[in-house]
Image (cartoon, rainbow, N blue to C red):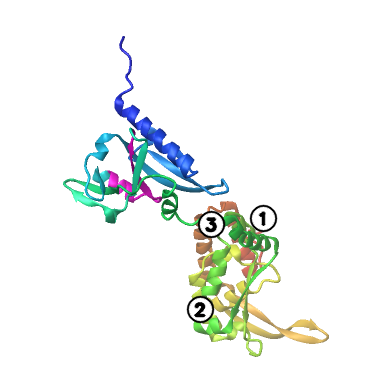
Amino acid sequence: MDLPKYDNSSKKGEDGFTIVKSIVEKNLNWILRKNHQENDFGIDAYIDIITELAQVTGKSIAVQLKTGDSYFKEKNDIGWIYRGELKHLNYYLNHDIPVIIIIVDDFKNKAYWCLCDGSKTEKAGENWKIVIPFSQELNKESKNELKNYISPLTDYASQLEHFWEENKLLKEHERIIFLVDRCDIEAGSYSHLLSGMLRLEVNPELLLASKGKVDIGISGYDDDPRELRDIKEVRNWVNIVFKGISGWAYYLAMDKGAQFLRVMQLCKSKFKVIEGNTSLGNGLKGNNISIDLKSGIPFLNDLFDDLNHFTERHNIPEETNKELSFKLVEYLSGYKYPPDKS
C-alpha cells in the first residue's frame, strides 16, 4: 500500500523539540511555543518568559533548533561549530527580539545553545559559522544569562495612571489655557506652547474633546500701558508662532470670552481705534476697534489652509471642517455665515 511516510528528519525535529520543551518548562519554568512550519523561515520556536509569580510577561526569545549527531561532528577546543546560510543570519540579526541557536543531542537528551550575535560569527565560504560552547548546556543555570538578553519588565499601566488622569482633566474642563511668558515672546520662542498643543493630539479622544477649547494668555505685560496688539514684540511673536504651530482654527476658542484669536486677528489685519464710543457703565467711555476685514483676508485664507491640512491629517470629518470654517468667518467678521437665505 502506498502511504505517506514520517521521515527521519521530521522525527528528529519533533524529538529535539520535545527535549528542549521539557528542559525549558521544567528547569527554567518558562514556556516553549512551536512556530508552525508554514511560518518557519528559520525560527523553529519561541521561549515565552514567565516571572517567578507565574506572570506571562510578553517577553520572548526566538529559537533556531537543530537535532542530531551531524550538528556535533565539527568542533574546536571551545565548542561545536554551527554553520548557516547568510539569508538566515540576516533574518536572525534583524529580529527585534534575541535569537538563540540550540543544538540537541537526542541520544543523551541534552541541548546546548548560544546567542546569535553578529560579533561572534565568522565568514565560512559563502556562508557563516558560530561556536556553541561545550559549557553552555541548556539547563536551570542558563536562566539568568538568558534573562540578560531581554529588555527589563516595565509596569506600563502604573506609569500611565498619571497620563490617563491628566487626559481626563483636559477632557472635562471647558477651557484649556496656555500661558506664554514675556521672556518667550521677546526671545521669539514657542517650544513650551508647541509641546502643550501637541499634547492634545496624543490620542483621538483627547483631540476631539479639545476642539474649540484652547486659549492662550500672554503674561508679563500687566504694567505696560500698551495693548498687546500695539506691542511690536508681540506682533512679531504672533507671526512666528502662527507659522510654527498648526490647528489654530480647530483648537482656538471662538466665544465671547476668547482672547488669543482676536489678538492674532489684530496682529494680522489693519484696524483703527475709535476713542470713547463704548459705554463702560458709570458714565465711563471706552475705545472701540474698527477692523478692515479685507486686509485680514490673507490671514483667513491661511487659517482655512491650515484647517484643511490639520483635519485631513487627523481624519477629522469634513462636516467638522465646515462647521469650524463658518464659525471662524462669523467670529472674525461679526457676520453670520453662511447668510440666512430668507
The three-letter code of the residue at mark 3 reads Thr
In the figure, is residue 156 to the left or right of 142? right
Q: Quadrant of residue 214?
A: bottom right
Q: Give residue 209's position: percent from left, percent from top.
A: 64, 58
Instruction: Give the extent of the magenta segment.
Output: 88-106
Q: Magenta includes 212?
A: no
Image height check: is 203 above or below 87? below
Q: Secondary structure at mark 3?
A: loop
Circle 1 is placed at which residue position? 341
Q: Is residue 265 above or below residue 131?
A: below
Figure check: 267 above or below 310: below
| Residue located beneath label 2 in the image | 189
- Quadrant containing the C terminus in the rendered view: bottom right
Mark 2 and mark 1 lie on one chain; the one further toward the N terminus is 2
Residue highlighted by disc 3: 154
Q: Is residue 228 left or right of residue 48?
A: right
In whole angstroms, how far apart are the C-alphas of marks 3 and 1? 61 Å
Which badge, 3 or 1, is on the more N-terminal residue? 3
